[in-house]
Amino acid sequence: KNEVEQSPQNLTAQEGEFITINCSYSVGISALHWLQQHPGGGIVSLFMLSSGKKKHGRLIATINIQEKHSSLHITASHPRDSAVYICAVTGDYGGATNKLIFGTGTLLAVQP
Amino acid sequence: NAGVTQTPKFQVLKTGQSMTLQCAQDMNHEYMSWYRQDPGMGLRLIHYSVGAGITDQGEVPNGYNVSRSTTEDFPLRLLSAAPSQTSVYFCASSYGRVGGYGYTFGSGTRLTVV
């Protein structure tokens, strides 16, 4: 079983829809990261969370430490939001390390 | 522009050739790392460094070497390329040695070994 699980693996939405991507993890963490990767592109950090909720534009990320679960929400989705969204966690694994453990990503396609 | 610079963006190698993927950051980050991204497997850690002169192995280190002689640079060397090393490689850096800091990723190197 992967230490970081994402769902769904693939998601197709119509422009304007509210989108939720889920991430569950099974290890102790110091932070959870949401990353975005456009097709053939680089990786951009969207959020880093250790508790609560963060908002940036139409993107909202929440984390529940007790339940080891995080969600990424996109309000009023747009075709330019089409990308792979990756959940990753960091923690103090064995000393002075800053190791990222990644989920396998959610491929989002927003159709006009 | 501040950030992580990776070169080259694309490379084709023949089996057995060696090459170095370059990674440089200008943010004075202590932590630097190399990942490979393969379809259906997500990103996997190859090697990482918590400061100049300090490196360690990640999840998939075989066939790769690294060194960290300066804070800014963290090159990844493929000693004898194999088709199994066909992948997209990302370098990333972070401020702190332990978790809790954001990451900056390079734009990636798409490597094909034939």
Image: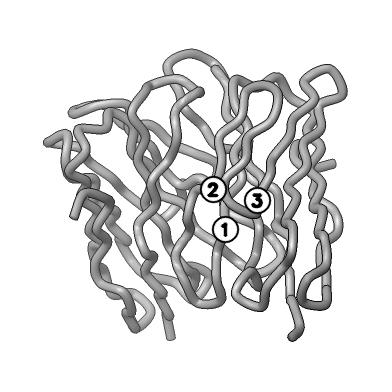
Mark nearer the viewer, 2 or 3: 3
Q: Quadrant of residue B37?
A: bottom right
Task: Determine the chain carrying the residue at label 1.
Answer: A
Report the disc number at residue A59. Answer: 3
Mark nearer the viewer, 1 or 3: 3
Q: Quadrant of the C terminus of chain B?
A: bottom left
Considering the numbered disc 3 on the image, is that residue within a helix, a strand or a loop? strand
The amino acid at mark 2 is Leu
- Tell which residue pokes out farthest to the top in this image: A95
In the displayed structure, does residue B9 sit left or right of residue A51? left
The residue located at (50%, 45%) in the rendering is B45
Find the distance from the CA under tag 1 to the CA under tag 2.
Answer: 7 Å
Q: Earlier in the sequence, mark 2 or mark 3?
A: 2
> Camera-side residue: A14 or B96?
A14
The residue located at (31%, 74%) in the rendering is B9
The amino acid at mark 3 is Leu
Considering the numbered disc 1 on the image, is that residue within a helix, a strand or a loop? strand
Q: Quadrant of the N terminus of chain B?
A: bottom left
Q: Quadrant of residue B67?
A: top left
> Camera-side residue: B98 or B21?
B98
- The residue wearing badge 2 is A46
Q: Position of residue B104 (x, y in %)?
A: 38, 46
- The residue wearing badge 1 is A36
Find the distance from the CA under tag 2 to the CA under tag 3.
Answer: 9 Å
Q: Earlier in the sequence, mark 1 or mark 3?
A: 1
- The answer to whether B103 is drawn above or below residue A52 in the figure is below
Task: Determine the chain carrying the residue at label 3.
Answer: A
Q: Are marks 2 and 3 on the same chain?
A: yes
Residues at marks 2 and 3 touching, judged by CB atoms closer than 8 Å:
yes
> Camera-side residue: A50 or A52?
A52
Residues at marks 1 and 2 touching, judged by CB atoms closer than 8 Å:
yes
